[in-house]
Image (spheres, rainbow, N blue to C red):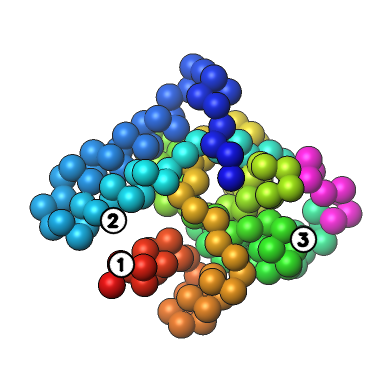
Amino acid sequence: MTAIKQSEFKGDDRHETMIKTIVQTAGFMSNPRQAEYWRGLADCAHPVRVVSAYDIWDANTVKMLNLAVRPAKKECYRVAALLSKITSGRARYTEGQMWASVLGVDHAFNYIADRDVYVDFTVEFALRKDPTREAHIAFQSFDDDTIWDIIQSNGYYGNIYNEVWLKNHR
């Protein structure tokens, strides 16, 4: 995945603020394992460009995807996981953060690899906001096998980055 050039976000410091907050959080950790986790998160965090779903799919496809996924507020992990599954992984599940008023909040959305852009069905269709105007940073995108194994094991959506990190750092 290609990180977006900083010039693309000129005059918008939300991305940088989210990443700096993660770096600062790593510095506050007294537990070495927690500090390692937060440093790793900071290392992989990068600003990304989010486009409208209509820039990727035609109107009928977007309508069908919305009916299947049923985007809802506060259900970004479910929405992103289902969109990945329904598109056979073309819209890869991604965890990161989105700017919410004054800080970054953990969030899930989808990476469209063949276009090197992201879509956010929760923002666009549940919150009814223009996703191109919202600041997002991505940590990592995951394949369907990984996310669904973790979802089935945990019994809930989300927390994929954490689970993969823990598995790789035992």
Q: Which residue is mark 1?
A: 169
Mark 2 or mark 3, whichever is nearer to me: 2
The answer to which of marks 3 and 1 sits earlier in the sequence is: 3
Q: Position of residue 7 (x, y in %)?
A: 54, 19
Residue 37: which numbered mark, if any? 2
Q: Which residue is mark 3?
A: 65
In the structure shown, which secondary structural element does the residue marked by tag 1 occupy?
loop
Q: Amino acid at mark 1?
A: His
- Measured in 3D between alpha carbons, the distance from the residue under mark 2 to the one under mark 3, in whole angstroms, is 35 Å
In the structure shown, which secondary structural element does the residue marked by tag 2 occupy?
helix
Do residues under tags 2 and 1 come within 8 Å of each other at their CB atoms? yes
User: Is residue 122 in sight in this rendering?
Assistant: no
Q: Residue at x 82, y 61 (%)?
A: 64
Q: Residue at x 61, y 69 (%)?
A: 144
Q: Position of residue 36 (x, y in %)?
A: 24, 54
Q: Which residues are magenta?
A: 53-61
The answer to which of marks 2 and 1 sits earlier in the sequence is: 2
Instruction: Choose between 142 and 20: the one closer to the eye.
Output: 142
- Measured in 3D between alpha carbons, the distance from the residue under mark 2 to the one under mark 1, in whole angstroms, is 9 Å
Q: Horizontally, is 26 left or right of 167 in the view?
A: left
